[in-house]
Amino acid sequence: MGEIKVSPDYNWFRSTVPLKKIIVDDDDSKVWSLYDAGSKNIRCPLIFLPPVSGTADVFFQQILALTGWGYRVIALQYPVYWDHLEFCDGFRKLLDHLQLDKVHLFGASLGGFLAQKFAEYTHKSPRVQSLILCNSFSDTSIFNQTWTANSFWLMPAFMLKKIVLGNFASGPVDPVMADGIDFMVDRLESLGQSELASRLTLNCQNSYVEPHKIRDIPVTIMDVFDQSALSTEAKEEMYKLYPNARRAHLKTGGNFPYLCRSAEVNVYIQIHLLQFHGTRYAAIDPSMVSAEELEVQKIKLHSSSEQEQQ
């Protein structure tokens, strides 16, 4: 039990990357918690948004690996917001506070849905350069909980935790996945009643993504072939919504591939971000990119701009 929590990697992460707390709303109780790692000279970082049960540190393996390769990475934990518009407004204020004009977003489950809603919310003045959607969805009605969404705030914490745990894998899993689930259960235990109630409300409140508003944003859809909380119908809906998206399929990984299949996830993230190397939207320190790679990117950019002009 708790292998990840006592692992050298996790302890190294906690001892080297400070947790920052930022308030951007008039309400002092709305606190964003975040880990910001990598060179601050990078103006278009990759930001991670967690699932209902997650805290900012569930992405510690991505932070360690990607910053080692020269990327700037920010992992977030949301304050208590009760509707999508309020979340989007708060997130926009956070980006303003961090002086970030545009960002790449990696969203897991609820995090992916919120990333899409934020891209939609800012479509007239775009703040999202690209999206990586991991085990995510585009319509909250898939959970058949829209009728209870307005009553989560009344429920005690133990009941809310039971609802979330109901979506965790229950069958036999390999030891690495078991460690990942243990870690997520531990993170879930650290969340208070209002945090959980607000996230479940955002997860189930009647809402869907309007694809015509975000169709020009580069998207990678990341999902798993084994058991996860996401139905096959929900996955198919995502493919239909983003017909031009890159697909990153993992044979296994369950609900939390970023924890238990981190090496594969990190490679897919790099592949996604590669298309921005050599541009002002690169999430990587230019000195960490090889000259040949930059040359290849310039040729690609040049040929794609020529095609657009034709």
Image: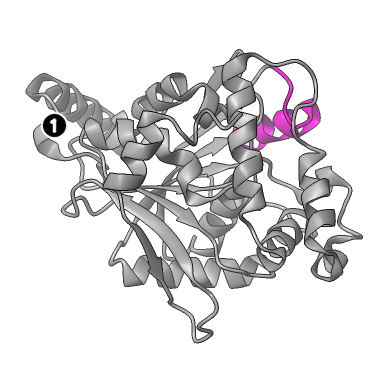
To which residue does mark 1 refer?
A: 288
Report x, y in % for residue 112: 58, 45
Q: Residue furthest bottom?
A: 26
Image side of residue 149 versus residue 123, left or right:
right
Q: Quadrant of the C terminus?
A: top left
The way the protein has been coloured in the rendering is: one colour
Asked if residue 76 lies in the magenta stretch, the reply is: no
Could you tell me which residue is drawn at 86 percent across and 57 percent down?
Answer: 146
Q: Examine the rendering and report whether any part of residue 201 can be seen.
A: yes
- Within-10-Å neighbours for mark 1: few <14, some 14–19, many 20+: few
Q: Is residue 157 above or below residue 182?
A: below
Q: Quadrant of the N terminus?
A: top right
Looking at the image, how many numbered discs can be counted on the residues?
1
* SS type, badge 1: helix
Q: Is residue 127 above or below residue 304?
A: below
What segment is highlighted magenta in the picture? 226-242
Image side of residue 221 versus residue 60, left or right:
right
Could you tell me which residue is drawn at 80 percent across and 19 percent down?
Answer: 171
